[in-house]
Amino acid sequence: MSKLSLKQTLKDLDTKKISIRELNQDYLKRIKEKDNLNVFIHFSEENVLKQIDNLEKDDSAKKLKGIPIAIKDLFCTKSMPTTAASKILENFNPTYESFVTQKLLDEGSIFVGKTNLDEFAMGSATNTSFFGNTINPLSKENEPLAPGGSSGGSAAAVAADLCLGATGTDTGGSIRQPASFCGVVGIKPTYGLCSRWGIAAFASSLDQAGIFSHNVEDASILLQSIAGFDQRDSTSAKVDIPNYFENLDDDLNGKTVGIPKEYSIDGTPMEISQIWEDAIKVLEKKGVKIKNITLPHTKYALPTYYIIAPAEASSNLARYDGVKYGFRSDEINSLDEMYENTRAQGFGREVKRRILIGTYVLSAGYYDAYYLKAQKVRKLIADDFNRAFKECDFIVTPTAPSAAFPLNEKQNDPIKMYLNDVFTVPASLAGLPGISIPFGEDKNNLPLGIQILGKHFDEQQVFNAALSLERSYE
Amino acid sequence: MKIDKNTINKIARLSRIKLDDKESEDYIKDLNSILDWVEQLNEVNTENVEPLSNISSSILPKREDVSNDTNSSEEILENAPDKLEGFFAVPKVVE
């Protein structure tokens, strides 16, 4: 199966080689064929056909006119329900549109469906969803693999060619890790580049929207479309958004890449160390200076994250109380009982675990010891990167410590599951942009990912380095 | 052990999440193992380090101070599990 790129499709639509209807019929057919992967929480053919009808009547030129896009079911959409993969939002129909999806609609894209995720984006395998597991499209018969998470449905949608791009959100690696597991490109931009307005909140100081695509060029086109200032998000950045695609330049001659020694972790499979070395060699051949850097607080990033993220989550998820929207328990003899039963029955196990941890670390007597301490270590982690970026233009590391693992393999031990994010969490804490691109395979022919990190708002450098590595690998 | 039966009940109560006995036991185990693991942060010297709460490096812009009045009560109530005459409805609170 040869996958069309977004860039090529835009040309084909422009030259009338293919119509919007023909293009989307093709994707609809595949979506129905691949139903067994459980990629979508919400899919309606009728809804897609209606969008095609409307676009056919629309004469205006639009940048993404007719392009099929999948939306992570964490973004509020007026035209489709929004669940965050939780029972507590099972019947929620937003009355407003998220900033990111509104931008995509304004550009004329077609939403093919809402993709599966870990409940409230809490997980690394898309196996905490109330709506069941998503299966990695690269699985072999009878050996279902996890697509990664939390944006596993969006990564799988791109990998199975059910759309030309998908939105995701990344709090500690939820775009980059599933991109690596599914063999697609995934970019988490700088914190604040894309408005959080209308995205169900998990950990607000970390949450950031981003893009999955077949290749780096497509990612640069789509990120351009969803970035921008929005006054409804108090941390939205007022920065100029360059035309990433027009400015793409794979000539890295004279640039410096930072290689952090702390990312060589005991127990990392040989194959992962190997692709990392391969990537460095490729860059060296292209005239890039290799600089060994040190990020001394790297090993503290995960425990820091697993204090800060649950603390913020416990606060953000207080809004699901059975009063304003979503599920309400039947056992409601008093107001308190209504809250307690609604939340007990509405949230899944991992979400409850994080709310409880978060409540504990914020509670009187423990706040300084846990939450404040974590915020201080976070500062040291951010400072590490600031220092490192004085000596290099971008940083290259592996994306994840393994290839896609079998479904449910790591479910019982929370800490083991959290280790999936070991290479992605530090940049999240520092708010830096990061991309994962497919680069090499393991012994079972499963894709592995390389991560490229850049300075704040230097997505262009991240794209350029990614393009250069992608071209050398193809 | 940092989290015992009393602590988990207290946290569950603060979180407004009802737990049965089996769940309480599981969470006591999970939370203790997670808290033991995050304990390693105590190795880090954070004296005179400012806590970082906002990572954004851009300057947060101020908005114009203009009133923006819309009546969207119908929209707001649209997803409510129970409503009454323009209000959210909940079980009786006052006898």
Image (cartoon, coloured by chain):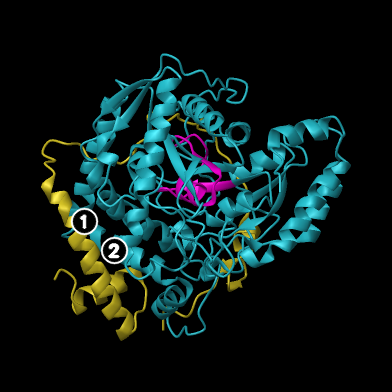
Chain colours: A cyan, B yellow
The answer to which quarter of the image holds residue B68 is: top right
Residue position marked by numbered label 1 in the rendering: B38
Callout in the foreground (1, 2): 1
Question: In the image shown, does B38 or A144 lie closer to the viewer?
Answer: A144
Identify residue type, mark 1: Val
| Rendering coords of residue A326 (x, y %) | 55, 68
Q: Secondary structure at mark 2?
A: helix
Which residue does the image show at 41% across and 67% down from the upper left? A409
Identify residue type, mark 2: Ile
Which residue does the image show at 46% across and 69% down from the upper left? A321
**Residue A393 drawn above or below residue A423:** above
Q: Does the magenta portion include A290?
A: no
- Which range is magenta? A167-195
Image position of A104 (left or right of A251): right
Q: Badge 1: few (under 14), some or many (20 or more) residues near its Cα, within 10 Å?
A: some
Q: Secondary structure at mark 1?
A: helix
Question: In the image shown, does A335 or A310 lie closer to the viewer?
Answer: A310
Residue position marked by numbered label 2 in the rendering: A357
